[in-house]
Image: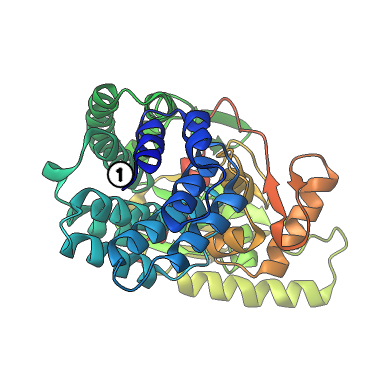
Amino acid sequence: MDSLIAAAARALAVGDVLGALKHISLRDDPPALALRGIAMAQLGEHIRARELLRSAARGFGTHEELAKARCIVAEAEVALAMRDLSGSPRTLAAASTTLAARADSANALHARLIAVRRLLLLGRIDEAASALARLDARFLPPPLLAVAELAAAEVALRSLRTAPARAALGRAQAAAERAQVPALLAEVAEARAALDRPAARRIRGDDEQLLRLEDVEALIASGALVVDACRRGVRADATWLSLTRRPVLFALARALGEAWPGDVDRNALIERAFRTRRPNETHRARLRVEIGRLRALVTPIARVQATERGFALTPKNDRPVAVLVPPIDGDQASLLGLLGDGAAWSTSGLALALDASQRTVQRALVELEATGRVRSIGRARAKRWLAPPLAGFTTILLLPASLRPG
């Protein structure tokens, strides 16, 4: 390593991006390109950073596998910052294996943490938890340890386990203080503050009650039958019935849950489920079909009974019924929850995270842009989407999570 490369690396290590660029800005050899890419990433120029890192990886020869693997890891982190989730995880896993085989344990662990963070963005909570459990925290330097504990806290929060989340955030705080990285300290502080903000609303007739994550956890542990409009499903104890892809059934379940212990008029159910104010015999026939489907689905935990004027939800084992709705209601709450993290998301990344088609996401974004709730930057394939942070409450329950069925 020559003196200019070494000086640039030292400058980047302490956050002096401009100082690093002064040493290498006119050089185009692979080590200089790699450092310039890292510098651009630190300045937020992610597209340019990716180009430089790819050029550096191509420039390193077959005998420089270690340097090439480091470039792949750096590019993967840039892709994560860009919310570009379309890359193959196998490439990153291969780079991690190469780094570990050549005794670069810090970067190998860094690669594995990037993979964990990608899984969290995609809502694959169980896979992220499994990958975290295989990490050996003893070999993590303080900055990476803080990132690992933040990831562990997010896994716990997305699984509604607030006590382990608080413990992980305490360890993350200690590691961030040792690392003295302002961005990490701010991220830990924001995560801790989120625990004390409202996460959902509980609907009881005409009354609403704001609940924190701890309150939601306690409600689910109480054994109540919960109609969850945050994650679009119905749960009771360990049983989870997802209705994410069945919006009509969920609309019916929510209407019945809000009316419990009373019933709901047939015309009101038609209006909620089919969004029409002029029901006819076709709508009534369709309602009978959809009620039959809902009745079959919830059989393990409840009954849907016909009444003189409509239908009523009757939980088994005399459970109470609770309806949870997001702090912001509407069909696009999950999309706004993702965009609320302050990052610029690609349409493909949003589609992957929401497990929806790109066309569906594009239509939703156009609608939200028309009302001023999101904005776009860039054009064509470089187009990204942003939304202002959703202040005043936490979005944890709006984020995608692949919950296990009961």
Residue nearest the viewer, comparing 177 with 193: 177
Residue 245 appears left or right of 30 = right
The colour scheme used to paint the residues is: rainbow
Task: State the residue at coordinates (28%, 27%).
Answer: 179
Residue nearest the viewer, comparing 280 with 13: 13
Q: Residue 236, percent across and down?
A: 36, 54
Q: Residue 163, percent across and down?
A: 24, 34
Please name the residue that numbered disc 1 is placed on: 156
Q: Which of the 4 image quarters holds residue 177?
A: top left
Is residue 302 among what the camera can see? no
Residue 99 appears left or right of 402 = left
Task: State the residue at coordinates (70%, 57%).
Answer: 382
Task: State the residue at coordinates (53%, 59%).
Answer: 353
Residue 384 appears left or right of 159 = right
**Residue kind at label 1, given as amino acid type:** Ala
Is residue 134 among what the camera can see? yes
**Height in image: 293 above or below 326?**
below
Identity of the residue furthest to the left in this view: 138
- How many neighbours does mark 1 have within 10 angstroms: few (below 14), some (14-19), or many (20 or more)? many
**Height in image: 277 above or below 217?**
below
Task: State the residue at coordinates (78%, 56%).
Answer: 379
Q: Quadrant of the C terminus?
A: bottom left
Identity of the residue furthest to the front in this view: 2
Residue nearest the viewer, comparing 344 with 242: 344
Q: Residue 258, percent across and down?
A: 58, 46
Secondary structure at badge 1 equals helix
Q: Residue 331, percent across and down?
A: 68, 52
